[in-house]
Image (cartoon, grey):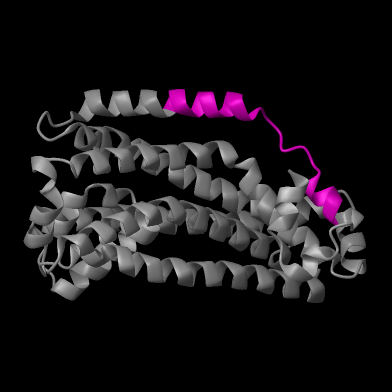
Amino acid sequence: MISRLRNLLPARERLQAGNPLLHYELGRPAGGNFALQLTALILLLGTAAAIYAVAFGVSDGGNLSARLWQSMYFPALALQMITLMLALGLGAASVDGERSRKTWDKLRATETGASLALRARWLGIMYRLRAPISIILLLRLLLALGTLLDLTAFGGHYVKMLSAETTPALSDWRVGLLLIALSLTLSLAQPLAMIASAAALGLLLSVAVVERLYSAVLQVMLAAMFAAFILAASAGVTGILQGRLIMSDAAQYLLVLAYSSYGDWGLLLAQVSAVWRGAPAGAFIGPGMAALLLLQALIADGLMALAERVSERRG
């Protein structure tokens, strides 16, 4: 595992793979049993989906993938938010833990020691959250499989129908098929980008904010802002797809794009028919998400670079 994590580090840091500080960071026990965590999360998510389906009802109409999406959507959304906050919290507690063990000053005194430790901890957070991340990705694979099965409807002409009914209409159904494939791929990549960004932001807080109380307050504020965004954007997107929200086409597109990228991390895109027919330029949400995903990756790396600089100056 240590070797695989080292290979993900930048080239200048891989050259020092034998550094004992790097081995120390990556060699810590991850804690917990992965199989046990995975099983518990599957049972918890399945129970939550069943309770939601019974309490709020799931439409009998539509296909199997639509019913699955309706029952799993909000439990999955809750799991994603919890995972995001865990990534932020683990990152924010990183340097404080090193200070309590009186190892942080030693890391900073070593050439690139603090930088290596932060990068290694960034990867370590992703590893520690591998159980919820696995569930998030498995659910998306299941929904993607359902979407692919839907594409075989109407004798394989379903994509042609969608391509003609979206606004603006697509000139070639093959373009529609490529856009669907792009959307499904992005729905797998977006969760990793969001969780990695949250961990990077947490690491920046850990080196920039020394007081635990201030750090905790900032984390609560960020969690509240994210929850408020999800609630507001979800209501807006629902209104758009149901034709109840009056906005310009550009504003509707941007709202659906923002929610798909940063709200539910692409879960909405599993409902290809609803998005393509209900949202202006719904077929082009995928390319927009691809651009935002690239930007987000650059921001996450920038946060890590900033955390490294702050650690060198302030400690």
Horizontal and vertical percent position of residue 82: 49, 43
Give the dominant element type of the magenta stretch: helix, strand or loop: helix
Can residue 258 be seen at all in this image of the molecule? yes
Check the image and report above or below for 63 versus 178. above
Number of marks present in the image shown: 0
Quarter of the picture containing the C terminus is bottom right
Horizontal and vertical percent position of residue 179: 27, 61
Check the image and report above or below for 262 versus 75. below
Q: Quadrant of residue 203?
A: bottom right
In the displayed structure, does residue 121 sit left or right of residue 159?
A: right
Horizontal and vertical percent position of residue 279: 16, 62
Q: Give 313 or 110, whichever is nearer the viewer.
A: 110
Can residue 228 be seen at all in this image of the molecule? no
In the displayed structure, does residue 198 sit left or right of residue 286?
A: right
Q: Give 183 or 49, whichever is nearer the viewer.
A: 183
Horizontal and vertical percent position of residue 23: 85, 50
- Does the stretch in magenta take in 130? no
Write the residue at 28% across / 29% down. 52
Quarter of the picture containing the N terminus is top right
Write the residue at 45% across / 41% down. 136
Q: Give the range drawn in magenta.
A: 22-44
Q: Give 50 or 269, whichever is nearer the viewer.
A: 269
Q: Give 9 or 268, whichever is nearer the viewer.
A: 9
In the displayed structure, does residue 61 sit left or right of residue 195?
A: left
Q: In which quarter of the image is residue 248?
A: bottom left
